[in-house]
Image (cartoon, grey):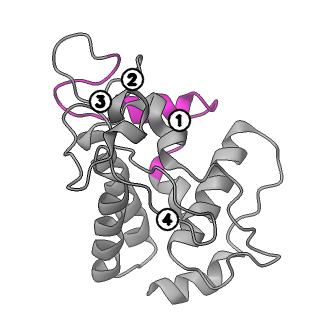
Amino acid sequence: MSWSSYDSASATLISLTIKSPSSFLLTHLYQFFGALLGCSKYGSGVFTAYQGDSSMYEVHKFMNLGPNELGYFITQVALSGASFGVTEDDLTAVGKSLNAAFGFRCAPEAEIIPGLGKQLNSMCIADECPLHPNATCDAYETDGKGTSGGGGNDTSGNDGGSDKSGSGKNFVSGILLWGSLVPAGLLMWAA
């Protein structure tokens, strides 16, 4: 199944009408990925345009994500897509795009969602995240590093939630803040 064939069926797979934290999260993820992947129904009456914060840095900065947490998330996206028959080539392209867009600390502003303008989008902001080749750390709070209370993959013993295994506890705790634990893969492809 290619992205385009998945896209044509996507509008009928889920309808979120309950105003809950999980619904809020799922709706924004659904909308965001619809825009990011260029789904043909995006912005139509059956597939509402993205209505969340346009800066992925602002949305995720409290999580202080490291490469392992972001990698875990991207892997879950790929596994979910594969379960729906998305081709390996398409999954690889999406994974590379996600890593390029969000996997560097201090990335310069970029327009990820067409029409929303350039925004700060670094999601990988823990100390061990690779520095973007055109880093603009001064544009980010705390010079592009995570805010206190995050975890990343700091192995110093005071990491706020992650561990040496890179198990992604901060990603899970970020989901828990919205009130329920939903596997990341289901979030991406539920719609």
Q: CA distance from mark 2 to mark 1?
A: 14 Å
Q: Does the rendering let one see residue 61?
A: yes
Residue 191, x across and y down, in percent: 63, 66
Between tags 3 and 4, which lies in front? Answer: 4
Element carrying mark 3: loop
Start-end of magenta stretch? 160-184
Asked if residue 150 is positioned above or below residue 69 in the image, the reply reads: above
Q: CA distance from mark 3 to mark 2?
A: 6 Å
Q: Name the N-terminal-most of marks 2 and 1.
A: 2
Quarter-of-image position of residue 106: top left
Asked if residue 70 is positioned above or below residue 2 in the image, the reply reads: above
Q: Which mark is residue 112?
A: 4
Element carrying mark 1: helix
**Residue 176 belongs to the span the image colors magenta:** yes
Name the residue tied to disc 3: 152
Q: Residue at x 40, y 79 (%)?
A: 86
Name the residue tied to disc 1: 175
Packing grade of label 1 (10 A; few <14, some 14-19, many >=20) is some
Q: Residue at x 42, y 17 (%)?
A: 149
User: Looking at numbered disc 4 in the image, what kind of residue is underneath it?
Assistant: Ile
Q: Does the rendering let one see residue 145?
A: no
User: Looking at numbered disc 3 in the image, what kind of residue is underneath it?
Assistant: Gly
Element carrying mark 4: loop
Q: CA distance from mark 1 to mark 3?
A: 15 Å
User: Looking at numbered disc 1 in the image, what kind of residue is underneath it?
Assistant: Ile
Q: Name the N-terminal-most of marks 3 and 4.
A: 4
Dots 1, 4 in contact, CB < 8 A: no
Name the residue tied to disc 2: 150
Q: Main secondary structure of the magenta part?
A: loop
The residue furthest top is: 158
